[in-house]
Image: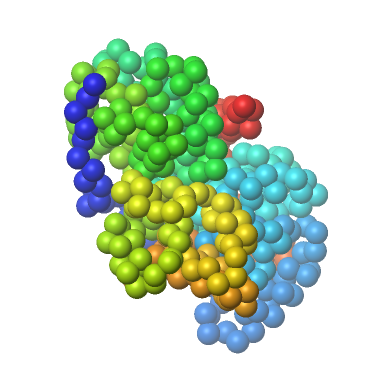
Amino acid sequence: MTTAQPLEFQAPTPSPLALLLLGRESDPRSERGVECPGDLPAPSDPDLVERARAAKAKLGDKVFVLGHHYQRDEVIAFADVTGDSFKLARDAAARPDAEYIVFCGVHFMAESADILTSDAQQVVLPDLAAGCSMADMATAEQVAECWDVLTEAGVADVTVPVSYMNSSADIKAFTGKHGGTICTSSNAERALRWAFEQGEKVLFLPDQHLGRNTAVRDMGMSLDDCVVYNPHKPGGGLTAGQLRDARMILWRGHCSVHGRFSLESVREVRERIPGVNVLVHPECRHEVVAAADHVGSTEYIIKTLEAAPAGSKWAVGTELNLVRRLANRFAAEGKEIVFLDRTVCFCSTMNRIDLPHLVWALESLAEGKVVNRIEVDPEVAAFSKVALERMLALP
Ligand code: SF4
């Protein structure tokens, strides 16, 4: 049995890529590019809505626009379908007649859509700077080094990688190559149960919180069964003994949006709104999840609020664009929905996709010019697909 690591989660080592968001360069180690070529329409252009409508109408069935739940309202207004990342990738694959898939989401989602769609379909991300800070917290080089550390500790051959959908194609390919599976926040428990039938330990990438919450809350493991591998420390900051004793080796990554909710936010909202139900995403920290009334994926959050009785009160811990839309949608039914935190908490990279970028992408496609195409290397795509198909085959 290992000694439990203190649950000191934040103040992470910043991604070396963070500042590139402000620039116009690219970093090959990132899961995203950062350069956004082309002349964008001015955000103040009063005709933006009409321009988007006209370009989309001109493209007709050739284009299929996907909108992730966390996108802005102005973008969601043009989405043919909305959903979480995996649902959207499957929706795209189910529309083989659509030559262009415009993915209003972030880079790893567009990669997954490219992996799951046919070669004849081209996936476009309206702003290449729309990456995911969590996905960037696990690079291919860091994960390969981690596997060497596990090998030296004599545990690699009993360890099964399980990678969250929110990871780069490189990490998905690593997972496929090493006998592992992808999971979403809806099926993480099933993925872990499957993985523990294949081996003795799981290397969970890149979100430590989803891994810990699933292992401890849903599967009854103890916090002592989990260790955190820090890619910024030699040997991940762990001894060979700690690696041998652990059942869950959690990568030190987190979502910068969900990681912000704190136990204090839960206490404060319970005091402020008597009788409130606290509903959070499993990417939140363990103590927040433990204090919540309901925990689940974005699809679960939406379904729970749909089924909630009139007059009920909810504090929701997930991305603000979605919470605000749900609050507006259900206000007429007498359901009171508030954001769990007092401060504004959008996903800044999701918000990179705005109406000017969408108009630019659609108008370019309507002129026959494919911009910001996301194309995954064929070998990476093949191994990623192995891991994704293992997920689809989960019992
Ligand atoms: S909400 Fe979190 S996990 Fe989702 S794209 Fe933004 S940073 Fe990544």
Residue 302 percent coordinates (x, y):
58, 58
- Is 294 in front, or is 386? 294
Report the side of 134 relative to 87 (left or right). left
Image quadrant for the C terminus? Answer: top right
- Is 289 in front, or is 260? 289
The colour scheme used to paint the residues is: rainbow
Residue 241 percent coordinates (x, y):
21, 18
Query: Measuring 39% from the left and 72% from the top, which residue is drawn there?
Result: 273
Report the side of 175 relative to 366 (left or right). left
**Residue that extends furthest to the bottom in the rendered view of this protein:** 46
Residue 37 visible to the viewer: no
Relative to 352, is 256 above or below?
A: above
The image quadrant of residue 258 is bottom left
Residue 205 percent coordinates (x, y):
40, 36
Query: Measuring 39% from the left and 13% from the top, which residue is drawn there?
Result: 157
Query: Measuring 30% from the left and 27% from the top, which residue is drawn there?
Result: 225
- Is 69 in front, or is 352? 69
Residue 201 visible to the viewer: yes
Relative to 151, is 229 above or below?
A: below
Query: Measuring 70% from the left and 49% from the top, which residue is drawn there?
Result: 91
Residue 64 percent coordinates (x, y):
72, 57
- Is 287 in front, or is 104? 287
Report the side of 281 relative to 19 (left or right). right
**Residue that extends furthest to the front in the rendered view of this protein:** 275
Q: How many numbered marks appear?
A: 0
The image quadrant of residue 58 is bottom right
Image quadrant for the N terminus? Answer: top left
